[in-house]
Amino acid sequence: MVLKDSAQEHDKDVHGFTQSKFLAVKEGLEREVDVEPAKPIFPGGKQVKHVVSGGVAGALSRTCVSPLERVKILLQIQVKDPKFSGVGATLIKIGREEGLKGYFKGNGTNVLRIIPYSAVQFASYEEFKKLLKVSEDLQNQTPLRRLVAGGLAGTTSVIATYPLDLVRTRLAAQCEGAERRYRNILHAFQTILKDEGGLISDFVLGHLIVRARGAELKRMDKDRELPVVVRLICGGLAGGISQTVTYPLDVVRRRMQMKGISGDLFAYTSTKHAFTTIVQVEGVKGLYKGMWPNLLKVAPLVGIQFVTYEITKAFLYGQGLQLPWR
């Protein structure tokens, strides 16, 4: 039996899976054969599935690189009498003094932040696209408008989930023993609210490290024709470059998030004051403390996130557990 695709009679759903009618030709006779698409196993539309897929991918990838993330934060907040030096030495010190759980301090809060962050980012991106009159046709989209829409969506999601980011930093920064101030996530929230009066009181422009990912997430399906290796390399390079450029802002953000418990050490009055103080006291290199563990986590983060996202998305659409490189 030979199957001919009847291109005129197919209907694509929002994600690109098709329900087609074919002409079956056998012994000179033609008849139509309906090819049923795979039925999604997860309720909700395209946006819901993308948010869930992004949440799962983000949670797993960030958990895998959590040890490097914690090393980065510990190095970022060191000013006087440093206790940690180098990636390897810090990893060994954490394991020796705090055990395996020490590598994942603050990761629970980071994982909790992923779903609301993704949901707000996707929803706000669509609204900003409408506001900026960004075409739905990728071929007609202007890079500048797409970048602005993605940047605004990133800003919105950062603001919405900032309290969780603050708690994550506080938990990751504390060590065992006398320095331990918070018992868990809930206790951290309660203590910060009680002692400092709020969770966003020090929120300044320096905290808005916006990665314009909204537009890139919308292009994920469009770029599927590119080889997986090329996509991973490009994603890793883009991530490394963007994080290097914005890294000083990340250092300033972490320092200012520590003001509530180390106000005398991080006595910054503004973002500008933080920048100038760090450069005067520690030199320009102070703005890049913890840079190496940050770069080391880019490749595994991008790879794990990409593979997990594609597998989860296919599974939610009823396509089974498909590997993206197959």
Image (cartoon, rainbow, N blue to C red):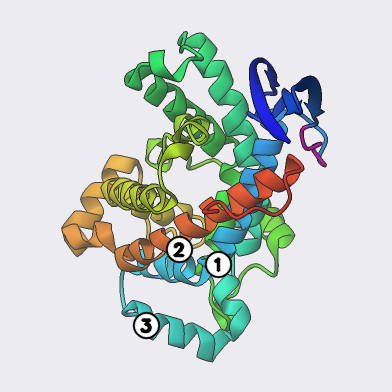
The circle drawn on residue 300 is 2
* Pick the front one: 28 or 90: 28
**Residue 217 position in % (x across, y down):** 51, 35
Compared with residue 285, is residue 139 higher up or lower down, i.e. above or below?
Answer: above
Indicate the secondary structure of the residue bearing disc 1.
helix
Disc 3 crowd rating (10 Å Cα; few below 14, some 14-19, many 20+) is few
Residue at 77% of width from left, 20% of height from top? 30
Contact, mark 1 vs mark 2 (Cβ under 8 Å): yes
- In the picture, measured across the screen, residue 39 lies left or right of residue 305, that is right
**Residue 57 position in % (x across, y down):** 60, 52
Q: Of discs 2 and 3, which sits in the foreground?
A: 2
The circle drawn on residue 88 is 3
Question: For the residue marked with disc 3, what is the amino acid?
Answer: Gly
Residue at 28% of width from left, 52% of height from top? 244
Q: Of discs 1 and 3, which sits in the foreground?
A: 1
Residue located farthest toward the bottom when viewing the structure as drawn = 96
Label 1, on which residue?
64
